[in-house]
Every structure is written in C-alpha cells, then in structure tokens.
Image (spheres, grey):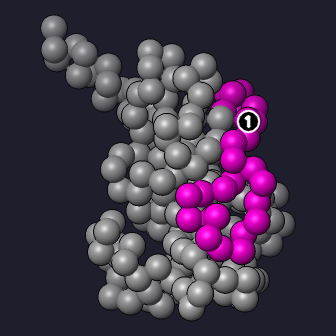
Amino acid sequence: MNYWWTSDYHFSHFNIIRYCKRPFETAEEMNETIIRKHNERVKPEDTVFFLGDFIFKGGKEGGVEKYRQFEKRLNGKFIFIKGNHDRHNSLNTIISKIYIHYGSKDICMTHRAEDTDPNVPWNFCGHVHEKYKVKRLNEKSLIVNLCVEVWNYYPVSFEEISSSVVTFLKEEKQCAVNAK
C-alpha cells in the first residue's frame, strides 16, 4: 500500500480550464485525463489524501450521482478534506484540517493555504491551483501546493513532495547567497 496526495480535480467544471489555463478543450477531456493519470499511479489498495474540490457543484455538473460515478472510476481509498466547492456537492466530508506525522515530518493538511498552521514544518494545501508549488509560510514552516496543475495532473507521492521541498530550499539558499 502507498500514500498519495492531490487536490482540485474539479470534475465537470468547464470554466476551471480557462481560469487556471488547464490544457484541455472540454470538461470531458479534462475528466478523462485526470482519471487516467490518477489510476496510472494509484492502486486499489492505496490511500489518497484529497485536499478539496473533487467535483465542482450540484446540478448537471455535480451532485450525488456524478460524484459517485467519478469516485467509482478512481483507484484508492480516499480521505477527503473539505474544499470550498465541496459545500455545494455531495462529498459530505466533515474534515476541514488534519494533522499527520509521516516520513519523520509533522504535516498539516487543509484545502486553503490561509488555513495552514505556521507552527508545523510542512503544510499541504490545495485551492491555489497554478500559483506556486512550494513557498515559505514563515522561517520554520513551508506550504506545499498539491493542486493537480502543478503536478502535471497526477497524484503525488511523499518522495516527490520531499524532492520538490529540497529543490525549493536549495533555490532559496542560492538566492540568499546571491543577494549577499
């Protein structure tokens, strides 16, 4: 069994393509690409931490039946964290923030970056889409954006997240050296 992290699939949300410059022509193309990439990595026995905004909303774009159709097609056992669009769909998760200790790191997971914990070394969030991959929250805390846009529409492993954090810290250190 493996663990995976991701957020903001926004299934059936056509306007997210334009808002976030997603490389798709239609919502159906986006949906199918995300499902394919998800299942390329995630096995049925794996656990997926999903940091919000699974499906856009109720009505023709979302709703209980649409949500179930998408969930049935995706591998893995999901732990859903509530996103801002999830209040309008059938996800019904009660988790808005969760803390874990994994890979020798204390980690806070939430949908919105503004809800992260400045006292935890690593914070995982969604919501910010293509804005950044890793950024500093304060001198002792980082935020890692798990939105699909910055991970080529794949869920990511802890090793991939760690590698991105290491790259960020090296670049940050280099910038500090260059500024002197």
Dot 1, how many residues are within 10 Å of its Cα: few (below 14), some (14-19), or many (20+)?
some
Q: Position of residue 127 (x, y in %)?
A: 48, 54
Q: Is residue 26 left or right of residue 180?
A: right
Q: Quadrant of residue 117?
A: top right
x and y percent of residue 92 in the render?
Answer: 76, 65
- The residue located at (31%, 68%) in the rendering is 19
Q: Identify residue for label 1.
A: 99
User: Percent x, y for residue 40?
Assistant: 61, 74
Q: What amino acid is found at the position of numbered circle 1 in the picture?
A: Tyr
Magenta segment: 81-107
Closer to us: 88 or 107: 88
Q: How many marks?
A: 1
Q: Is residue 97 magenta?
A: yes
Q: Does residue 12 lie above or below 21 as drawn?
A: below
Q: Residue at x 40, y 34 (%)?
A: 135
Give me the residue at 57% from left, 76% from top.
57
Quadrant that contains the N terminus: bottom right
